[in-house]
Amino acid sequence: MRRVIGRIVMVGLVLLSAAIAAGWVRSYLVADLAQYFRTTTVNATTDEQESYQFSSGNGGLSLAWGTTEFAFSTAQEEAENRRQSGYTYDGRFRLNWTNGDKWYGGSGYTPASMPHFLGFSFYAVSAKPCNGFAMTMPWALPLLLVGAYPGWRGLKAWRGRRRFAEGHCVKCGYDLRASSERCPECGTAIGASDARPAE
Ligand SMILES: [Zn+2]
């Protein structure tokens, strides 16, 4: 049972790694921006807009969250703002946060340049009417976090299979062509682990 769960987790990690790798490649071809807005009423003349953003471009991805309070001058303005709420997608997004491009934060949407280093950046603003943060990272980071373990296991399994095929010990690589039953080097039973090195 534990082995079945392990297999399922491994398949999930491999699929996720493939999806991340695809996102990484895509980031060089298209600039994506997906955002979700939600508008709530603060009081009779003020609304608050909360947004969640995901964007990707030039080998990096960014996540942002923020709230902006604003006073609407007419009922139409408020209605228009509420109409814009919900999910939106922009495939022609041109801001490249990964390279420290502008992020619109602070009072009156003043453009702010994000400090950045090796594709990483973090920018936070906490001053009414704006609250929020934006962070960017290279696509390589999530790929490393998700793909390192299945990659290492895959490498081990591949090495074990190759050793088995060559008549070497699956575990330590010792030449077993003159041996039977057990590896004289590490004691692993010969043929017991069919290309599946010790856990
Ligand atoms: Zn051995």
Image (cartoon, grey):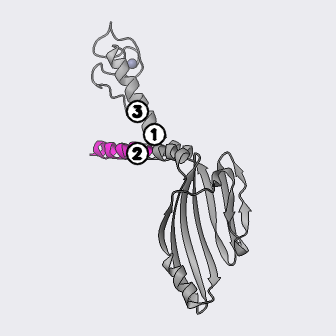
Mark 2 lies on residue: 13
The picture places residue 75, in percent across and down from the top left corner, at: 56, 90
The picture places residue 136, in percent across and down from the top left corner, at: 61, 54
Q: Which mark is residue 163?
A: none
In the image, is the residue at mark 3 within 8 Å of ligand 1 by its beta carbon?
no
Q: Amino acid at mark 1?
A: Tyr
Q: Over which residues does the magenta segment extend?
A: 1-17
Label 2 SS: helix
Q: Is residue 175 left or right of residue 146?
A: left
Q: Which mark is residue 154?
A: 3
Answer with the quarter of the image where residue 76 lies: bottom right
Crowding at dot 2, Cα within 10 Å, few <14 / some 14-19 / many 20+, comes out as: some
Answer with the quarter of the image where residue 63 lies: bottom right
Q: Amino acid at mark 3?
A: Gly
Label 1 vs 3, first from the N-terminus: 1
Residue drawn at x 63%, y 89% is 73
